[in-house]
Image: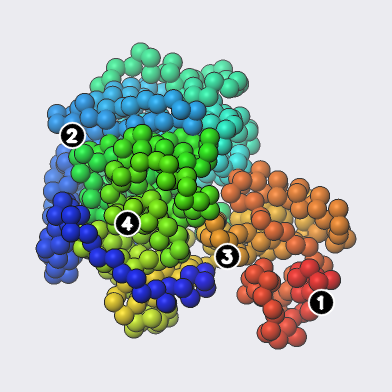
Amino acid sequence: MSDTIESALHENRHFPPPADFVANARLKPEEAEALYRKAEEDHEGFWCDLAREKITWHREFSVGLDDSQAPHYAWFTDGRMNVSYNCIDRHLDTRGDKPAIIFEGENGDTRTYTYRDLYHEVGKLANGLRASGVRKGDRVVIYMPMIAEAVIAMQACARIGAVHSVVFGGFSADALRDRIDNSGAEVMITADGGTRGGRVVSLKKTADKALDICSGTVRKVIVCKRAGNEVNMTEGRDVWWQDLVADQPVDCEPEWVESEHPLFLLYTSGSTGKPKGIQHASAGYLLNTIITNEWVFDLHDEDIFWCTADVGWITGHSYVAYGPLAVGATQVVYEGVPTVPDGGRWWQMCQAHGVTVFYTAPTAIRALMKLGDEIPAEYDLSKLRLLGTVGEPINPEAWMWYYRTIGGERCPIVDTWWQTETGAHMIAPLPSVTTLTPGSCTRPLPGIVADVVNEEGESLGPDQGGFLVIKKPWPSMLRTVWQDDHRYKSTYWPKFDGKYYLAGDSARRDPDGNFWIMGRIDDVLNVSGHRLGTMEIESALVAHEAVAEAAVVGRPHDVKGEAIVAFVILKGERPTGAAAEEMVKALREWVSEHIGPIAKPDDIRFADGLPKTRSGKIMRRLLRSIAKGEEITSDTSTLENEAVVAQLQGKA
Ligand code: PRX
């Protein structure tokens, strides 16, 4: 992280919005200015006006913000609406035949769904869910490949007021079990398998494993036939999606839910304990996804939008499954990885589908940058007009490569800071207004009151690092941690008299007022733009029979952002040579099985003990230095067991 801060401090390149971009933008500079002014004068009124304008209501609301239960904030409480209706039905008259989703499989199969097709597919599945006894408020776990049916499944849940909980298809049976049990889901939607990286991932097999070990709430499993791999179907419990919907009518009356009705849970890592089920509401969430697709992505009717995120993450919720549909856009959905059959796949797809607005993560940009400029140069990327990034700070070198090689020095780059908890972009450029600086996510959006403060909650001056906070509630904020209000309060509102939302990131502002994200303040790693709690990985490691103790820290990595380094104490002798290599292999596999391949430690070191203070606290700062290979200059004599430092450094 320190590299990012260091380079950022010297960054003085500025990129004002191109004139032709401004001329055609949805949001003109003077309109943006008016929005900022209005938000400052009347925060609640600002959001109410937008909610009336952007959402199609079944029953209008009269209450804007209800803060009587703070820090549980509620928005537009007496209104009724349906998210799926807003994403599909309201476009049928004007955009019924417009492509909503252009799907491409890794193997190259494609299928286009118009808004009317989506209406039919979502309606049939929603009816199938209702026929299976799913009612408003019931939880449905979705464990799918990145195929159009994943979006259809989410929309079908929204249509009938069921609360979906999407689990990333790369997660293991254990991780899936935790999420099923915590959500108390009765129904699961999965697929036989999906294709990623040239091989079939057998999702149903993993789902079966999870169902074998979970507490048994799931009574129905709907299986989409996709990869054609062989699966076991359990009589009475499992049904093929294609069979379930075969006789269902296409029309499905939406469930008109209250604004605050939970739309979904999405589990995310914290510094301690099990992943937390971030709970989002319906109307407020929808509102922020709509305005950010309009303001930040500047989506016009003619645009072809492509967000490369999987629906297993929040980005795939707000910028694949909901936001782009709510604004009536056409978007690309791709099943596979960017390197099959070669590193030109994404650029080839941009060319083939005429992508105009492209959104991805810095880790992917860095990985593709490494493959060289010749690959993107083979493709016609001239239709691109706007690029975006999300997930972690983008280093200026990667920013410049993205700008020049992919964007042809023509496309503004929107570096969007936000979180699972915030639901939508919070700090991000308005591409028709903001002068860009590589590495900075620039300014808070209208209506978002972000600040950098010290321990006492006082605003800090230019270039002073502190806590990133949001000082006023916003519609798409998380409502709580599923069935754990205490965790909601203690994680997000622990300081500043419970008045400011604590994002968990440290940040600074430069003299121009641009925000620079510096890193996490808790024990959360950001690996390839995905949040992983160090404690989750430690728990997985100590669950192995040979392991006595483990500590996990991050180390800067030039593609993934952070690499995972695990310090492990075994129950027996400290292994060396081939025995150590064997054990490293076994433990990496173990973590992969227990959490998922993304959590596999990059580096595992063994010692006789962990460096601890005399009061028994693990010295994480020291471990981080060791992981980075830094010279240990601090005094280690206060350590209870000084000798282990040399072992962990590989010197003894
Ligand atoms: O640390 C910040 C980083 O990702 C965290 C949120 O992770 P998650 O909930 O998984 O959502 C990722 C996609 C929204 C933040 O607390 N982060 C996200 N976007 C940026 C970022 N750090 C720097 N710059 C960004 N643009």
Q: Which residue is mark 4?
A: 409
- Looking at the image, can residue 234 be seen? no
Mark 4: amino acid:
Glu
- CA–CA distance in space, label 1 to label 2: 68 Å
Residue on which the image places disc 1: 643
Q: Amino acid at mark 2?
A: Arg
Asked if residue 553 can be seen in this view, the reply is: yes
Q: Residue at x 29, y 54 (%)?
A: 411
Question: For the residue labelled by badge 2, is the local secondary structure a helix, a strand or a loop?
Answer: helix
Image position, residue 608 (x, y; %) = 82, 67
The label number, if any, that marks residue 556 in the structure image: 3
The alpha-carbon separation of the residues under discs 3 and 2 comes to: 46 Å
Say which label, 4 or 2, has the lower sequence index: 2
Disc with the residue nearer the chain's start (3 vs 4): 4
Q: Which residue: 53% across, 31% down?
A: 195
Decide: is 237 above or below 320: above
Give the mark nearer the N terminus: 3 vs 2.
2
| Res 652 label | none
Residue 101 lies, in percent from the top left, at 32, 32
Disc marking residue 90: 2
Spatial separation of the CA atoms under disc 1 and disc 3: 26 Å
Question: Of tags 1 and 4, which is closer to the observer?
Answer: 4
Give the class, few, some or many, for how many residues have Cα within 10 Å of label 1's Cα (few <14, many ≥20).
some
Distance from the alpha carbon under mark 4 to that under mark 2 = 37 Å
- Tell me, yes or no, whether the two marked residues, 1 and 4, touch with CB atoms within 8 Å: no
In front of the other: label 3 or label 4?
4
**Nearer to me, 236 or 191:** 191
Q: How crowded is the residue under tag 3: few (<14 C-alpha within 10 Å), some, or many (20+)?
A: some
Name the spot of residue 8 as percent of width and height, x first: 43, 73
Label 4, residues with CA under 10 Å away: few <14, some 14-19, many ≥20: some
